[in-house]
Image: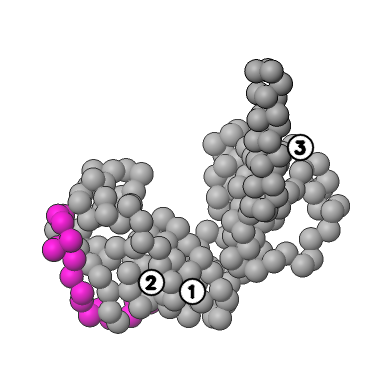
Amino acid sequence: MRAIQIHEYGGPEVLRRVELDIPKPGSGEVLVGVAAEGVNFMDVHTRQGKYRDSRTYPVRVPCTLGMEGASEVIETGTGVTSLCAGDRVAWCISWGAYADFAIVLYENGAFADRIRELTHGRGVDVVFDAVGKTTLRDSFRAARVRGLIINYGSVTGPMRDLGPYELGEAGSLFLTRPRLAESRRVERCQALKRRVGLGKWYS
């Protein structure tokens, strides 16, 4: 498969196109065929070596760049239970997207368990979920009682079997799906009110 790698830190000249074997997914991993990858400043900073000593983003050379993407699952490793070949997925903070294929860590809701652990079982006040079908119920688990879930994307598909009672069972949660159009409409109304208010103040 084709991949873009760096073997040393530096400018654009350190980017290399290489040929690699298609990787095999290990335990808790999935192999995806990369259809689209994100290109952002984190890739630039990685190439420049700004994360060479980072514990948050522990990527070291040599490495294949690209830390986010979207595609379909090709093959699953052992321990992967809720994904299968052909499922559409998106991922972030998993390097290797600048390639024809990539290995992605399968979490299976582990983020909710980790959030519960870090908050001593309480959960967070607000959860922002852009993934949708495969993560939304885990987002419920990550929220505190009467917490707010903001679902602003559905890259893995819409939730067609979600009943309102689930919000109650999960802790009397609030779920919203905001739209940019509504936000822009509210902003225009607020701006108009401010102009009217200023007119009255100056008159």
Say which element carries label 2: strand
Please count the marks in the image. Answer: 3
Q: Position of residue 159 (x, y in %)?
A: 73, 64
Above/below status of 40 relative to 31? above
Say which element carries label 1: strand
The residue under label 2 is 102
* Residue in view at x 71 percent, y 39 percent: 189
**Residue 44 or residue 67, whichever sits in front:** 44
Query: Which of the labelled discs sits on residue 146, or is there none?
Result: 3
**Cα–Cα gap, marks 2 and 3:** 38 Å
* Residue in view at x 63 percent, y 63 percent: 154
Q: Which residues are magenta?
A: 9-27
- Of labels 2 and 3, earlier in sequence is 2
Asked if marks 1 and 2 touch (Cβ < 8 Å), the reply is yes
- Describe residue 24's horizontal placement relative to residue 141 as left or right: left
Residue 188, quarter of the rendered image: top right
Amino acid found under the numbered disc labelled 2: Ala
Question: Mark 1 or 2, which is nearer the eye?
Answer: 1
Query: Which of the labelled discs sits on residue 71, or is there none?
Result: 1
* Crowding at mark 2 (Cα within 10 Å: few <14, some 14-19, many 20+): many
Q: Position of residue 94 (x, y in %)?
A: 40, 60
Which residue occupies the extreme front position in the image? 203
Question: Mark 3 or 1, which is nearer the eye?
Answer: 1
Above/below status of 49 relative to 134? above
- Describe residue 84's horizontal placement relative to residue 11 as left or right: right
Residue 1, quarter of the rendered image: bottom left
